[in-house]
Amino acid sequence: MDTRFLAIDDVVDTPPVAVVIDVMRAYTVAAWAFARGAEKVVLAASLDECLALKAANPGWVALKDGPPAPGFDAVNSPALLQTVDLAGRTVVQKTTAGTVGALAVKDAELVLCASFVVAEATTRLLRERAAGGSVTFVVTGEDGKAEEDLSCAQYIARRVAEPDADAAEFLRRAADSDAAGELANGVREGAHPDDVALCLELDRFAFAMVAKMEGTLMVLRPQVVPELA
């Protein structure tokens, strides 16, 4: 598998396969939304679009980065999401980096959104559908320099090539990242003390997350990997 690791702004062409990484916290939150019964996650381009979609679709759950705000039902925290009823519902998510990264590669043949909690499922889907091909990892945080996102991307890429590759060093790098420090120290609003641990929980879920255009919307859905379920 031929791999490249790009920041969002460095994506200038449409890759055949893209893996969009946001560990802390967009694609850990999305995974937890599916685990709590959400049917799908719509990736919004703006906060205004997020609220407009909710207004047009009663029952949809609007989710954003930062502190709670009028019109929004949830914030981008895996721990705080545990109190939100999502069974059978649609989540509309807008975050600073994760959703932006997915929309940047919306025309790719295959778009996977990932974090450590779905790393192995993502790896197996890549082996099945992208073996021998070209894969672009979109490292969404800090203009492509976020250590938690880069380490997760590199771990998944390594794991595709080396099924016995160990995650310990990659998880350590993520735990030592600026994002982890900010979350642990309460610097980021709309966070919970348990968020870092939840974001570093390796292979918590037995599904990958596939995003594709459905009409005019970029929609994320879970895809169970049977051998992991």
Image (spheres, rainbow, N blue to C red):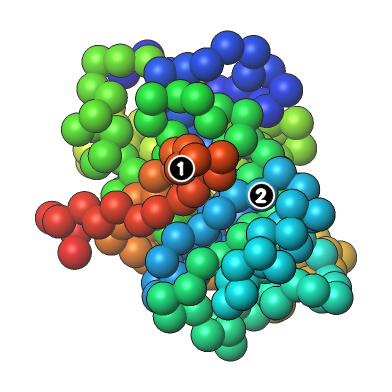
- Residue 187 x, y percent position in the rendering: 86, 65
Q: Secondary structure at mark 2?
A: loop
Q: Residue 214: give its label.
A: 1
Task: Give the residue number, with chain letter if any, for mark 2.
Answer: 44
* Mark 2 or 1, closer to the camera: 1
* Residue 168 x %, y %: 43, 51
The residue that appears at 58% across and 87% down in the rendered structure is 83
Q: Nearer the viewer, residue 152 or 18?
A: 18
Numbered disc 1: secondary structure: strand
Q: Is 134 on the left or on the right of 177, as rendered?
A: left
Dot 1: within a 10 Å radius of its alpha carbon, few (fewer than 14), some, or many (20 or more) residues? few
Counting every numbered tag in the picture gives: 2
Q: Residue at x 58, y 84 (%)?
A: 84
* Residue 165 visible, this angle: no
Q: Amino acid at mark 1?
A: Glu
Task: Estimate the spatial distance between the alpha carbons at disc 2 and disc 1, rounded to whole Å.
Answer: 13 Å
Amino acid type, callout 2 = Ala
User: Image quadrant for the C terminus?
Assistant: bottom left
* Closer to the camera in the image, 11 or 174: 11
Answer whether residue 218 is visible to the viewer in this image. yes
Q: Residue at x 37, y 15 (%)?
A: 134
